[in-house]
Amino acid sequence: MVADLAQGFLALAHPATFLHLIGGFLLGLVFGAIPGLTATLAIALLLPFTFGMEVTDALVMVAGIYMAGIYSGSITGITLNIPGAPSGAITTLDGHALMKRGEGPQALGMSAFSSALGGLIGAVVLIALAQPVSSLALLFQTPDKFSLVLMAIVTVTIVSSGSLSKAIAAMVLGLMISTVGIDPMVPEGRFDFGSYHLIEGIGLLPAVIGLFAVCELIAQAATPSAMTRADRVAQVRAPRRRDFLPARARIREVGPVAYAKSAVIGVVIGMLPGGGASMASFIAYAEAKRTARRPEAFGKGSYEGLAASETANNAMCGGAVIPLLTMGIPGDAVTAIIFGVLLLHGLVPGPALLGSNFIEIAPMFAALFVSSILVFLSVLAFGPVYLRLSQINRGLLYTFIALVSMVGVFASSWSVFQMWMALAIGVLAFLMRRFGYPVVPALMGVILGPYFEEFLRRSLIVSEGDPTIFLTSPASAALLVLTGVFVWFLRLRPALRDRQSARESGEGE
């Protein structure tokens, strides 16, 4: 296996193979950064072309797209407050706040450094522990998966800044949107109001585009004075490439423990079917906020929060490939399409794949490792270009984003109705922001809602309606306890401390 792995790294030294890796990486950067053009869509469009490629070139190319696409969702999130992909949503909170403070180069540099570090750790775990670690995912039963999703829903809600009741309302709205369409357990339509368009449900991409891209476009049009704020900050001094190197003091501020913890969270979430980069980044962000020395800075320009989310979502890449290759279970939407690439080349994911065809899979492992390094090098090469996104004429820029976003929605569903849904959700998101309701919990409700419902109903079917099934499973019970710990440290304890401080100050007066 070691010899085959060495052959995989040597395969990247072949000029044609390395060019496929670079081409895939650049394609992933573009598709991940532009709202509506995700890494999933990039690989899906590439899928027919991979049939005529050598298997090594095809796997190396999709690995480059995967790693770059997950990272680059943060680029427009930091510079424009519009994440290019759902995985960059939580990074946007702190990243754009830093951008408005004039620290855009450092924010982009920290994002790239953290993504590269997380990707490297994920790739190392994939290389070293693919077979033994994959057995852990098999131990997760349906009740355990429900408790994991519940933990993600709760933590996303409680880490949202502002009113808890408004965050809960936003999460509930997202969960409600996720229930529109065909019932996953019974072939009947729900909440479709007799419309054959709604019977297919509301897609994830229209929801993402509406909640972030369309919402931001409306917000910028409604407040023209705010459109140039980041511009004025960015134009104080032309950035140099070395400005994108994250300061050592800030890396030390985050600390090796926080990086390692976020990477482990990303790898573990990646191994669980349905986890994905969004869940990994949100849970890592919540854990970082729980243990931070200054949790009040999260959401207002915290490098710790930015580093935690970016480390986790790229570490997820290595973790998500483990169940794909060893059990034939994709960890997220991108690996589901990579599954198709493998099948096109006669490679059937499963327990025997790594044993009989590892020599053909090894270049993909090596490509994930090398792509992680390219993530950091990319910000040094293209950082000034990323930053100029905030200086482009806003009329032209937002017109282009609106066009690409709508084309992306149509390309993902071939439905004009879904384009109208993206616009409607965008108007709703704008009203939510105007009245102080956070948008991120609504997005996570849309993403996690189907898994929440499916795992809940399946668990109750198995237990014949007995809810104690979530307590009798050790893993499920542990996750529920961990959820309670998050609630205590992130909401209840700070609220009690504030109440005590208010009482003491009142008595002092």
Image: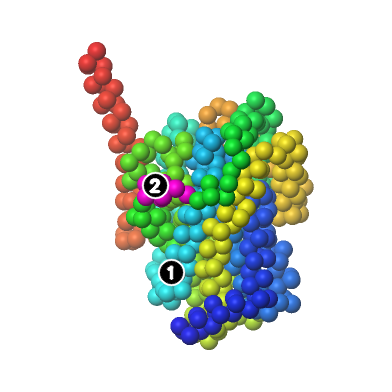
Q: Decide which of 455, 256 is in the foreground and name it.
A: 256
User: Where, quadrant-wise, is the C terminus in this rendering?
Assistant: top left
Is there a contact, CB below 8 Å, between mark 1 and mark 2? Answer: no
Give the number of the disc on residue 125: 1
For the residue marked with disc 1, what is the amino acid?
Val
Does residue 306 appear anywhere in the picture? yes
Q: How far apart are marks 1 and 2 (CA)?
A: 28 Å
Give the number of the disc on residue 148: none
Q: Decide which of 415, 54 is in the foreground and name it.
A: 54
Residue 43 percent location from the top left of the image: 66, 64
Q: In this view, does 209 lie to the left or right of 506?
A: right
| Disc with the residue nearer the chain's start (1 vs 2) | 1
State yes or no: residue 250 in magenta: yes
Residue 153 percent location from the top left of the image: 46, 47
Residue 187 percent location from the top left of the image: 63, 57
Q: Which residue, given by chain and number where applicable, does mark 2 sit on? A: 249
**Against 225, is 475 above or below?**
below
The magenta region covers: 246-253
Q: Decide which of 218, 395 is in the foreground and name it.
A: 395
Residue 218 percent location from the top left of the image: 68, 33
Does residue 428 appear anywhere in the picture? no
